[in-house]
Amino acid sequence: MLSKLQQESLDHKRCLLETQKLKDDLKRRVHDEKFARQIADMPEELWEDWGDFFERPFGEGCSKELCWDEADSEIDSVDGVSDNEYDFRIYFKGLISQEKVKDKASNYAGIGVAICDFRDNLILEITKPLVGVGLSKQAAELKALIEGLNAALSLELDRIEFCCDYYPIYQYITRRWPPKQRKISMLVNQVLLLQRKFTDCRPILMARNDIKYAFKLAREAIVSQVTQPVEQNESKSVKETCVICLEDTDSGSMFSVDGCMHRYCFSCMKQHVEVKLLHGTVPKCPHEGCKSELTVDSCRKFLTPKMIETLKQRTREASIPVTERVYCPYPRCSTLMSRSEALEYSKDALVRAERSGARKCLKCHALFCINCKVPWHSDMTCQDYKRKNPLPPVEDLKLKSLASMNLWRQCVKCNHIIELSEGCYHMTCRCGYEFCYNCGAEWKNKKATCSCPLWEEDLIWTENRDTDEEEMDEDSDYDDGWFVF
């Protein structure tokens, strides 16, 4: 441990020494460039009068340095941009690339930074791999820019411009667009704070072909990861960036979806699954367009026991068509089963079960009528039962009364009760049926078949909720403000 600390201290001193050498070299180059420009721009008459005596020794306090204020002022008037143009330029690039290593495709990220003088002569180059940046191109670009600005500050450069070829980043830095993701907003704020540390620092938008050196450097950073992969014993300290919340997380705290292998942090996955279960659907991989379904066993890592049971129920429901679903009518049971399962289970215990409509619950083993959906009415046909009990059960009447009072709607396809909490009148039930919440008319091909308005102002989300929604993951499905009972 002691030898390691000593080596780190020695490396730090060497780094400071090399940085100081680079600073001195830069100052000399800047001095020589300015002096050469002054000589080149000096008028002939001034050169004849002052040329033999004109000198600019390098370094403060030099006894040979001449104060030549009159000539300076005249030169500045001729070369009006010499003191106002930017002395240095930063080219930066963050790349994301999918590479195949040992027949396995993985995403790699790298950044490249080049600091050049005003003639685009290369002064400093940086190539650096990014571990865990995932699919976020914006995050990679911003991290490359931050690396370049920090390098410029360490070299004590005062006047710089940084060249950007990615339009969204340029809009963020110039404050024309506000970032929607919290992590991107934090990176943009970091760039703005670094800008203030310079005497003058401004962004310029360039074509991609004009970005020099940086592409090659960023690509080299990716290639270095592919040709020299990280050792297994170092994997414990590797961090990944969740592409939903953009937070850096230990690799061991990332959830990998079975089948597609998309990776997200446990917190985002927990929220994603809970919202899907609340909407009454089976959760799938959050990645856009991915159809991989989440398994109960894999979700045990981040879900509570209660949510696990709900996930089992939703998975079970999804495996049975809507028209085939049957629930045990006994309130303390309410077990879900299919019509075919209930019939097969009842054949051994009941004679002529298929004809009579009598069924036996798979869980509580109690008898019920599959036609009337009530506990079994012995010595009474379904017609006799309905004649003696013309009204629905008390619980159903209470639910319908509550639904009518709160203006809830019932899906005509699966009979679920739906409440509009916020948003437009276009409703999408968990069974996939689309309809107008105002009148109940069906939507076909994403178009209304009624003349009702699409929304009312009172039901549109407030500004505060819009702000909260922007901070949520772009891939989270918070569409159509509805809840299913």
Image (cartoon, rainbow, N blue to C red):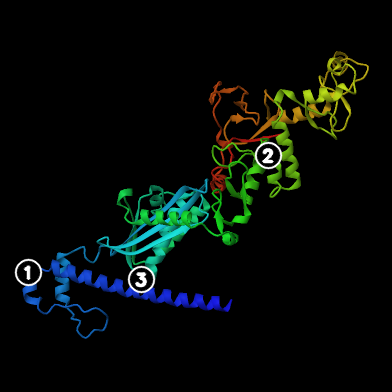
Which element is circle 2 on? helix
Is 310 placed left or right of 187 in the picture? right
Image position, residue 210 (x, y; %):
30, 51
Q: Quadrant of residue 374?
A: top right
Which of the pair 76/257 is nearer the observer?
257
Q: CA distance from mark 1 to mark 3?
A: 35 Å
Which of the pair 48/264 is nearer the observer?
264
Q: Quadrant of the N terminus?
A: bottom right
Which of the pair 201/468 is nearer the observer?
201
Which element is circle 3 on? loop
Question: For the point 63% across and 51% down, which residue is it?
Answer: 267
Dot 2 and dot 1 residues touching (CB under 8 Å): no
Q: Quadrant of the C terminus?
A: top right
Q: Which residue is mark 3?
A: 156
Name the residue at the right extreme.
Answer: 379
Image position, residue 17 (x, y; %):
39, 77
Identify the mark nearer the N-term, 3 or 2: 3
Q: CA distance from mark 2 to mark 1?
A: 83 Å
The reply to whether residue 359 is in sight is: no
* Amino acid type of the residue that numbered disc 2 sits on in the rendered structure: Leu
* Amino acid type of the residue that numbered disc 1 sits on in the rendered structure: Glu
Q: Which residue is mark 1?
A: 44
Q: CA distance from mark 3 to mark 2?
A: 55 Å
Is 220 placed left or right of 449 in the picture? left
Which element is circle 1 on? helix
Q: Which residue is mark 2?
A: 278
Question: For the point 34% across and 68% down, which residue is it?
Answer: 157
Q: How many marks?
A: 3
* Amino acid type of the residue that numbered disc 3 sits on in the rendered structure: Glu
Rendered view: 134 above or below 367: below
Question: For the point 73% across and 38% down, which residue is it?
Answer: 312
